Image (tube, helix red, strand yellow):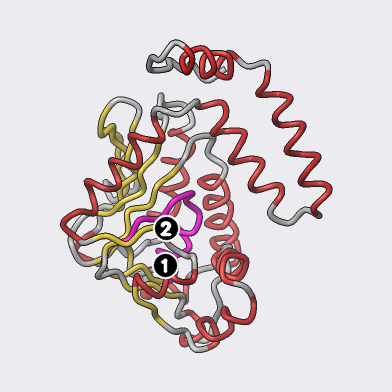
Amino acid sequence: MRAYASGKIVVEELEEGVYQLLLNYPEKLNVITLEMRRGIGEAVRDLRNLPAKVVVVASAGDKAFSAGGDMGEFLKTTTADLLEWGRTLVELEELPVPTVAELKGYVLGGGLELALSCDIRIASEDSVLGLPEVRLGMVPASGGLTRFVKAVGPLRSKYYLLLGKRMSAREAYALGLVDEVVPRESLRSRVLEVARELKELPPFALKEAKKLIALVADAPREVGFDLERKTFGVLRYSRDFEEGIKSFFEKRKPSYKGA
């Protein structure tokens, strides 16, 4: 186990190949202090050097994934702090392995920004999500507004962002902000099921698929087609591709090496 930000950020191996980045400040609803933001950045950089095949982003306690930033620090937060947090979220987004966010209770402000930087989001039925920053005289400024608008679209986004409106897990699912909604008692088991499924897939193909999705999201159609073909050309001669085809015909479990 590795700890950062005075133990409020923890990285640990849940099982072989599955690592967890844990927000560990449950007594304060896992609000993300400036120190914790820096700790998350350190943790994300360390995860690149660990034998992780999947990263679960989760939180301690029962009441919140994260209720957002620490309001007691808001008047001390500088533009440089926001830029640093924004870079950290991009680093999380660009990890070469899949990330799964385990959402419960409050998922607000910086907590939702963190969740939107993960690849897959699984929420408990009691989750409450939102970007309420406008109610405090500001806007999400570390990538959360942009990710929200790109996921939901500008017209629907105005309703939620201009009102600083919270939404239920089911609303978030309907908008495409979360991928699954499950009972609270099933949340951890379902997250681990998804992580284990991802862990068994070819790492090289997952890495390239993540990059490709990010690139084609804003690309013209023909550029997307071209990128798809070039990525296929790279994967076509990988050992994992050969292993996947051979194991299919040999009716055995594949053994992927990530190359």
**Foreground residue, 193 or 107?**
193
Rendering quarter of residue 217: bottom right
In the image, farthest residue toward the right: 222
- Identify the element where label 1 is drawn: helix
Coordinates of residue 100 in the picture (x, y in percent): 40, 47
Q: For this view, does 236 lie left or right of residue 207?
A: right
Which residue is at a point 48% across and 14% down the rendered structure image?
249
Which residues fall within the magenta stretch? 109-123
Q: Quadrant of the N terminus?
A: top left
Q: Would you place residue 241 above or below residue 122 in this image?
A: above
**Residue indicated by mark 1:** 173
Coordinates of residue 121 in the picture (x, y in percent): 40, 55
Q: For this view, does 108 lie left or right of residue 78?
A: left
Tag 1 or tag 2, which sits nearer the N-term? 1
**Label 2 sits on what residue type?**
Asp
Coordinates of residue 146 in the picture (x, y in percent): 62, 67
Q: Would you place residue 49 above or below residue 7 in this image?
A: above
Q: CA distance from mark 2 to mark 1?
A: 6 Å
In reply to whether residue 120 is colored magenta, the answer given is yes
**Label 1 sits on what residue type?**
Tyr
**Residue indicated by mark 2:** 179
Q: For this view, does 190 lie left or right of residue 161?
A: left
